[in-house]
Amino acid sequence: MFVNETPRRPWTEPGRDPELALSAQRGDLGALFTLLRKYRRELWRVCFALTLDRSRAERLFHDTLLRAAKNLGSLPAGTALLPWLARLAAHLATASTRKDASGAPVKPSLSPAALGTTLGDVEQPVLEAFAHLAEPDRLLLALAAVEKLTYPELAAVARREVPGVMGQLSVLRTRLAGEESA
């Protein structure tokens, strides 16, 4: 990157994504793998935030990549790929966690083994509250806190108006703060 060049925002600026997507839609596997490899770290963080479980996040990550490869033709022309992947992951997470085989709702496991880490007295209640949020709310908070998206970027990714995103984040943060103090 040059000194005066501003870094590209992968969540909102498509960069070379549209031309790579077009090549991939025409059957260029190299372009497809380049696109999917390019955003693997961000997609992994989204999948983990949605599932809060390492093994479920791995499944969701792979399912999202497979679904993206199959449905790349539905990517609107000129669109950034990363928001599309995040929405796809959120959709798949919601569909897969609605109910388990017995019909009971599935909630993320917060065991240290599932998370891949141990939690302190402060983190545990917040993470438990976070786990009880719906997947779209977890995605919104993860994009704001982990990916550091601005309100306009969050609105673009979530396909909502900025005031609505701001209001929803305020409600979610208040809810998490209330759970933490309880």
Image (cartoon, helix red, strand yellow):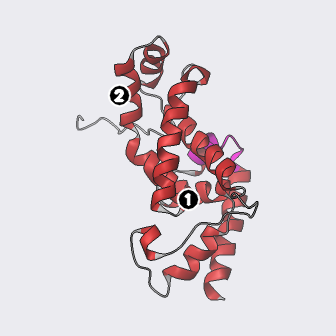
Where is residue 130, by image quadrant?
A: bottom right
- Mark 2: give few (<14), some (14-19) or many (20+) Cα within 10 Å: some
- Secondary element type, mark 2: helix
Provide residue 105's location: percent of width, then percent of height. 73, 63
Q: Which span is picked out in magenta?
A: 153-162
The spot of residue 96 in percent (x, y) is 65, 50
Residue carrying label 1: 51
User: Earlier along the polypeptide chain: callout 1 or callout 2?
Assistant: 2
Q: Amino acid at mark 2?
A: Thr
- The amino acid at mark 1 is Thr
Residue 34 disc label: 2
Q: Residues within 10 Å of mark 1 (few under 14, many from 20)?
A: many
Quadrant in which residue 40 is drawn:
top left
Q: Please identify the dominant SS of the magenta region.
A: helix
Tell me: residue 69, above or below residue 115: above
Left-right relation of 21 to 169: left
Question: Percent from the top left, x then y, of residue 29?
Answer: 38, 19
* Residue 138 visible within the image: yes
Vertical arrangement, residue 111 with respect to residue 73, above or below: below
Which residue is drawn at the image coordinates 45% and 60% (left, top)?
A: 54
Farthest residue, direction front: 102
CB of mark 1 within 8 Å of CB of mark 2?
Answer: no
Residue at 59 percent of width and 54 percent of height: 139
Return the residue nearer the eye: 50 or 182. Answer: 50
Is residue 92 left or right of 26 when viewed as pictured?
right
Residue 148 visible in the displayed image:
no
- Residue that appears at 73% across and 61% down: 102
83 and 29: which one is in front? 29
